[in-house]
Image (cartoon, rainbow, N blue to C red):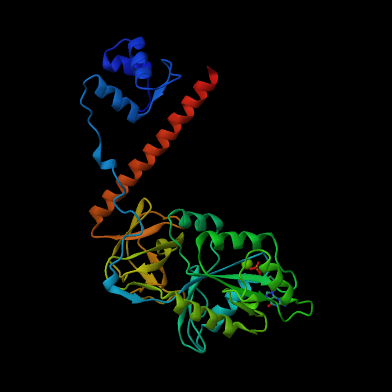
Amino acid sequence: PTFLSVANFATVLRVRVPELLEKLQELGFENITNEHILDAETAELVAEEYGFEVNRDDNLGADLFPAPLPTDDKKLKSRSPVVTIMGHVDHGKTTILDFLRKSSIVKGEFGGITQHIGAFVVQTPVSKKKITFLDTPGHAAFLKMRERGANITDIIILVVAAEDSVKPQTLEAIKHAKASGVPVVVAINKCDKEEANPDKVVADLSSNGIDVEDYGGDTPVVRISAKTGMGMKELEETIVTIAELLELKTEEKGVVEGWVLESQVKKGLGNVASFLVKKGELKPGCILVAGTTFCKVKVMKDEKNKIIKVAMPSQPIEVSGWKELPEAGDYGIQAKDESFAKKVIINREKRKRMMEEASQIEEMNQRRIKAI
Ligand code: GDP
Ligand code: MG
């Protein structure tokens, strides 16, 4: 049975209820009545006390794919940075991303900005380096990634409007940045406006814990206008400079790992997910496990809707071939074949059920204790 009360358990063990209650007390369990629900661990312990051999499901050990997997330092190659923009609403996040997206389209290139996959790559105008920009991810996905002790982003651009300065969501973004330990570039936007007061923004940020360059700190501050394009080149080159200092590296070959950015059902393609490769080379035919679903990679497209054959680290792509939709913030890892992928998933589903059951039992017992 899923839920085992003390009374039921006594029947299973063929002992009298008062005796079992005494035994439980001996073992250190307090506040127990014959209605109390036992968790699997306690039941196992007691059964062993009575000389029963417990048949445990060993498939419930560790997650077969604890993410991320360790890297082999000898195989590391440098990779381009992944950047996220954060800041208060209306301070210009979308306008900045649109400016960068447009500037990344080569004149006359077919397709334009038709495809939206939650991320795009630009080549910087001066240094000709690549930068991957993520569309500001939802709060939930971002937190989920952080819970796994990993950061999807290497650099955060903190946008603050020059005429509005520090606002509640600016402080929220500062909190995020500090907690993740990711380096910040401050972009003071809307500097084209007459009311712009970038010096006040610098002072406000400084008094809110940002170590601004203007006052001798480490955090670069760039004055921009996403409307006129002023300072945008400088912003991109600042990111490149920081990325170089970070010496970002990854394994280019071998097992693929990466993040699910978002997922949806698309006409003619079925379940698709945008995926940011972090490690390895992703190719059609690869098996990716993410959360409790997997994908046999069918078609891969870049942000310009172009079909690509190989996706490298820091490259965002749209991947079709998912059995079910994975969730934003899921970590994907390549499995050697479908049967292993299924094994990982069955294991995760069982673990998930067990956790849910454990918390349900805890809740039921809490309610009982309160009722006593
Ligand atoms: P988000 O909420 O942070 O994504 O902000 P948006 O990008 O949607 O911008 C909010 C408003 O500010 C829009 O009306 C933009 O046109 C305007 N805006 C954004 N950047 C600039 C800028 O550099 N200068 C001026 N004058 N307006 C801007
Ligand atoms: Mg926006």
Taking 162 as reference, is 159 left or right? Answer: left
Coordinates of residue 70 in the picture (x, y in percent): 31, 61
Taking the spot 50% from the left edge, 26% from the top edge, the residue there is 366
Taking the spot 79% from the left edge, 77% from the top edge, the residue there is 195
Coordinates of residue 305 in the picture (x, y in percent): 44, 75
User: Quadrant location of residue 256?
Assistant: bottom left
Taking 236 as reference, is 48 left or right? Answer: left
Residue 166 at least partly seen: yes
User: Quadrant location of residue 13?
Assistant: top left
Quadrant location, ligand no. 1? bottom right
In the displayed structure, 158 sits above or below 29; it is below
Taking 152 as reference, is 201 left or right? Answer: right
161 or 265, nearer to the observer? 161
How many numbered marks have been drawn onto this rendered protein structure?
0
Coordinates of residue 362 in the picture (x, y in percent): 45, 30
Residue 309 at least partly seen: no
Give the residue furthest to the right.
Answer: 195
182 or 122, nearer to the observer? 182
Give the residue furthest to the front.
Answer: 216
Taking 211 as reference, is 356 left or right? Answer: left
303 or 186, nearer to the observer? 186
Q: Quadrant of the N terminus?
A: top left
In the displayed structure, 35 sits above or below 284; it is above
Coordinates of residue 187 in the picture (x, y in percent): 62, 75
